[in-house]
Image (cartoon, rainbow, N blue to C red):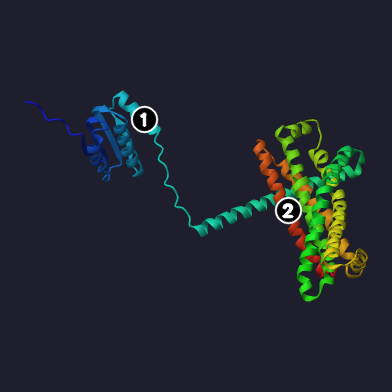
Amino acid sequence: MTGEAAPPLATSREGGRLTVALAGDWRVDAVGRHAPALAAVAPGGARAVEFDLRGLGALDTAGAWLIHRAAARLREAGCRVRIVRAAPDHAALIDLVGRNDRTRAPRPARPGPIVAIVARTGAATIEIGLIAARMIAFLGLATIAALRVLGHPRRMRWIALVSHMERAGLDALPIVGLISLLIGLVLAYQGAEHLQRFGAQVFVVNLVGISVLREIGILLTAIVVAGRSGSAFTAAIGSMKVREEIDAMRTLGLDPIEVLVLPRVIALVLTLPLLTFLADMLGLVGGGLMVWAELDITPDQYIERLGEAIPIWSFWVGMIKAPIFAFLIAMVGCFEGLAVAGSAESVGRHTTKAVVEAIFLVIVVDAALSVLFSYLGI
């Protein structure tokens, strides 16, 4: 008479202990049948649970995972769980499965478009605030270095200063002059085209003079310099940072702010007003050529009309803005250069940021100064 095979799962209770006896093969082809019975095992008031594996036959990772997950579920319910009378290879396999059980948390629900926009706006605002704080700290370091050089002029890198003045100023003359001349031509042509309809073509001179001297001359020059010299400052300093030359400077006891930043800032502050003066003059020349060709206003009449219609403060407004814009462009360029880290890709990224930030600051400060000068009646 052949005895009946033991059931794959049997439970028994003794006091506050629940025993779960497993028998037979627990492999991938059988766990589908055993899983519902194992999932139905509940503590039922028991504080301790024992998995008795002495009757267990063949076991693979699928069966071991099922046993491990059942034990983990009962532990989460507050029970003390033990696996007893297991063959060494069975115990080792269950332990291995337990160590590699990495249950992934469910993916958070995707926020709606409005929430995403608000989140991105908030993150961008925080980033702008952090950048502004770092820029203010950088300004403090530059100020300390400038005061130190002012007290000891021999510390100033005069050769570097002259070299940067040549690159940022003299080498920029052709592009700044050409753009200003063409803008003066276009501005006068558009003004003549529209003002002639009202018989007010004589006011084209006023339009050209005020626009070029107060706003267009300095703005165009600052934007060109930001794209040309500001990016060059970032790329040069960033490349030195990638090659660890700045770390070598610090090792030698040299201050990178004093060696790299101050000559560039001073050079641009000195040269941008000269470039602005050139842009103003060539913008007026371009406007004069166009009104001479379109409106038959002779150069003598044009110059006389400029003297009558344009107050001297219109010229000085643009010239006052020039060193302020130069300081902003140079500081942003050097700041982003020193922020480079890692690789050449970082150099390109920070160079782009330097140009965008410098142009943005120039336009914002120009708007603020325009409001201030208007309030002061200048």
Query: 229 or 293: which is nearer to us?
Result: 293
The N terminus - image quarter = top left
SS of the residue under disc 1: helix
Vertical side of 244 occupied by 288: above or below: below
Q: Which residue is mark 1?
A: 95
The C terminus - image quarter = bottom right
Q: How far across and how far down the image is residue 79, in percent?
A: 33, 41
Vertical side of 178 occupied by 192: above or below: below
- Horizontal side of 272 relative to 116 (left or right) equals right
Residue depth check, mark 1 versus mark 2: number of the one nearer the observer: 2
- Horizontal side of 351 relative to 314 (left or right) equals left
Question: Residue at 83% across / 40% down in the picture?
Answer: 258
Q: How far across and how far down the image is residue 246, in percent?
A: 75, 34
Q: Which residue is mark 2?
A: 359
Query: 21 or 24: which is nearer to us?
Result: 24
> Which residue type carries mark 1?
Asp
Q: Would you call the spot at circle 2 few (<14 residues within 10 Å), some (14-19), or many (20 or more)?
A: many
